[in-house]
Amino acid sequence: MNDYNEVRIDAVPCSEIVTDVLASMLCDIGYESFVPDNKGLTAYIRHEMFDSYAVDTVVDSFPLPEVTLTWHDGFIEGRDWNHEWEKNYFKPIVIGDDRCVIHSSFHTDIPSCEYDIVIDPKMAFGTGHHSTTSLIIGHLLELDFRGKSLLDMGTGTGILAILAAMRGASPVSAIEIDPMAYANAVENVAYNGHPEIDVRLGDATLLSDTDKVDIMLANINRNIILADIDRYISALKQGGRLYLSGFYVNDVPMIEAKAHPLGLKTVSVRDLNDWCCLEMEMTI
């Protein structure tokens, strides 16, 4: 099924912090894509997962008391999501001092960069526009991947796994729980000429059958990371690096409190627009 519900939330007053908090809360209840503007946020969820009570709960529990929220929803029949993203939302983006350009297969005016990534996102997360994706891409552009294996949890469009493979990581694997996002990641891997990337459909339980890796990425959200971090650790080599994102700077102490007793130490914390990327090292 390719039908979606579109939920529009208007905020007074509105700011980037307001729309980021809304996106984070909606992500926790299954929303996949978000389009913020200066009046609020439009969010998308598969039709069969839509629950008006859950949206009411987000609005009623919104943690910024000075903000007034109103919302409505509409049904969107399945369509060519590539075309919708290209037409309305997804524009080429350059990251890392002109080192990496991300664009769709339909774009024609594309700047020349060291790494050229084709992403047709459909309804999957990960075009490079969101702060969390940009933060991890910044790390990937700095790392020495020679002789290093990598696994990307919650790969979405596959963008991070693709860049890692372009930079020499091998082997590269990716796991995605959503069937449509999984199919999209497979397509994007093919677009970029990296069929060696092993994209698998499933959740963190697949890690029990995975060889330990040198580098793991998890750009998901705080609650999933907290629930699955012990599984991440089980698939990470001693001295391996774990890059976590999809949460706010204020969430770092909570994640560290869970991670440090399990053998991870914090290496660095980077933030952009209040979103965070936490770099950790496996010490046991």
Image: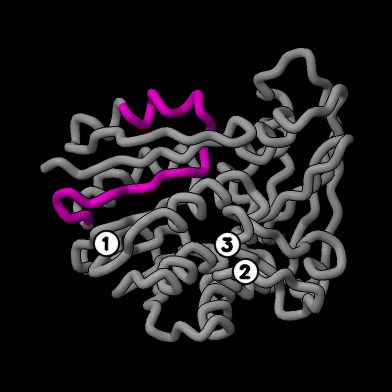
Question: Which SS class for mark 1?
Answer: helix
Residue highlighted by disc 3: 99
Tell me the kind of residue under disc 1. Leu
Relative to 53, say whether 162 is above or below. Answer: below
Q: Nearer the viewer, mark 1 or mark 3?
A: 3
Nearer to us in this view, 35 or 62: 35
Report how far apart the C-alphas of labels 1 and 2 lie in the structure: 34 Å
Magenta-span inclusion, residue 255: yes
Q: Is residue 95 magenta?
A: no
Left or right placement of residue 77 versus residue 128 in this view? right
Q: Which residue ends up furthest to the left in the rendered image?
A: 284
Kind of residue at badge 3:
Arg
Task: Identify the mark nearer the N-term, 3 or 2.
Answer: 3
How many callouts does the rendering have?
Answer: 3
Q: In the rendered structure, are the residues bearing label 1 and label 3 in contact, judged by CB atoms less than 8 Å apart?
A: no
Task: Please rate how many residues cluster around mark 1, counting C-alpha atoms within 10 Å: few if below 14, some from 14 to 19, many from 20.
Answer: some
Residue ID at (52%, 43%): 246
In front of the other: 114 or 55 = 114
Cα separation between marks 1 and 3 = 32 Å
**Which residue position holds label 2?**
113
Q: Which residues are magenta?
A: 236-256
| Element at label 3 | loop
Labels 3 and 2 touching (C-beta < 8 A): yes
The nearer-to-camera label among 1 and 2 is: 2
Name which of mark 1 and mark 2 comes first in the sequence: 2
At 70% from the left and 18% from the top, the residue drawn is 64
Q: Which residue is mark 1?
A: 207
Residue 148: quarter of image: bottom left
Name above or below for residue 140 compared with residue 73.
below
Q: CA distance from mark 3 to mark 2?
A: 5 Å
Q: Quadrant of residue 61?
A: top right
Residue 49 shows up from this direction:
no
